[in-house]
Amino acid sequence: MALILNIDTATTIGSVCLARDSQPLQTMVNEKQQDHAAAITLFVKEILARQQITPGQLDAIAVSAGPGSYTGLRVGVATAKGLCYAWGKPLLAISTLQMMAQGKRSELQDDTAYYCPMLDARRQEVYTAIYDYAGHDVKPPEALILTPDAYHTWLEEKKVYFFGDGSMKWEQLSAPHPHALFVPYHISAEHMISLSEAAFAQQHFADVAYFSPFYLKPFYFPAK
């Protein structure tokens, strides 16, 4: 069991959660993406102060490592790496999609369904994956261009919960299906807790010097 600082800035909502032994101690949230860089470091300082925790007492720092917003991911990963380097702590890199699926599974507790997190990747594209109730990816993370029959195979097998800011695209494009369930989702660093705890126990540490976010596709530079 460990004391882990969890950081997520992969989307428009950023948050920091301090957790001990898989239980959240305190979470702070910023809902303005342009303020992530300033807010996250202040959140870390305030949470540690309020919980009377020194950096030396932390066991590790976990970060939501993508896919997601290029700018957001860079902010979170750079912050986490900087803290790890300064405080001499290991870095835990947690998949943003896996984190989202974990949060929704914990909420719904439906072991008969698949869980499909979706992040908007512009145009008709989303970052997505499909997870079973045990957390295994039955469809690995990818940047997917949506088509009306993109999830036909999975919907024929069982219920699929679609959620995240990219799911609205799919809901508008797809035909109604009794197994397609669109549910609200509010991303939070709290959803990383069990994943970062497991990664720490298994010593799945990322290289602080060389780790970079899981972008899934190259950065797009619009033409001038």
Image (tube, rainbow, N blue to C red):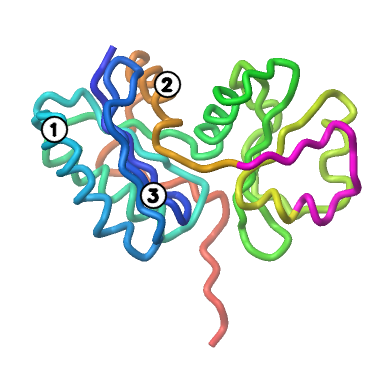
Q: Nearer the viewer, residue 104 or 134?
A: 104
Q: Which residue sits at x=15%, y=30%?
A: 51
Asked which quadrant contains residue 217, the reply is bottom right
Disc 3 secondary structure class:
strand
Disc 1 secondary structure class:
loop
- How far is disc 2 from disc 1 in space, using C-alphas? 22 Å
Mark closest to the chain's N terminus, 2 or 1: 1
Mark closest to the chain's N terminus, 3 or 2: 3
Q: Which residue sits at x=28%, y=58%?
A: 37
Q: Which residue sits at x=33%, y=57%?
A: 36
Task: Please give the range of residues in magenta.
Answer: 170-184
Q: Which mark is residue 88?
A: 1
Q: Which mark is residue 194?
A: 2
- Residue 198 is left or right of residue 155, and the answer is left
**Label 3 belongs to which residue?**
14
- Frontmost of labels 1 and 3 is 3
- How far is disc 3 from disc 2 in space, using C-alphas? 18 Å
Q: Nearer the viewer, residue 197 or 164?
A: 164
- Estimate the x, y position of residue 172 in percent, counting from the top left: 80, 56
- Residue 111 is left or right of residue 53, and the answer is right
- 171, above or below 25, in the image: below
Q: Which residue sits at x=61%, y=51%?
A: 165
Asked which quadrant contains residue 194, the reply is top left
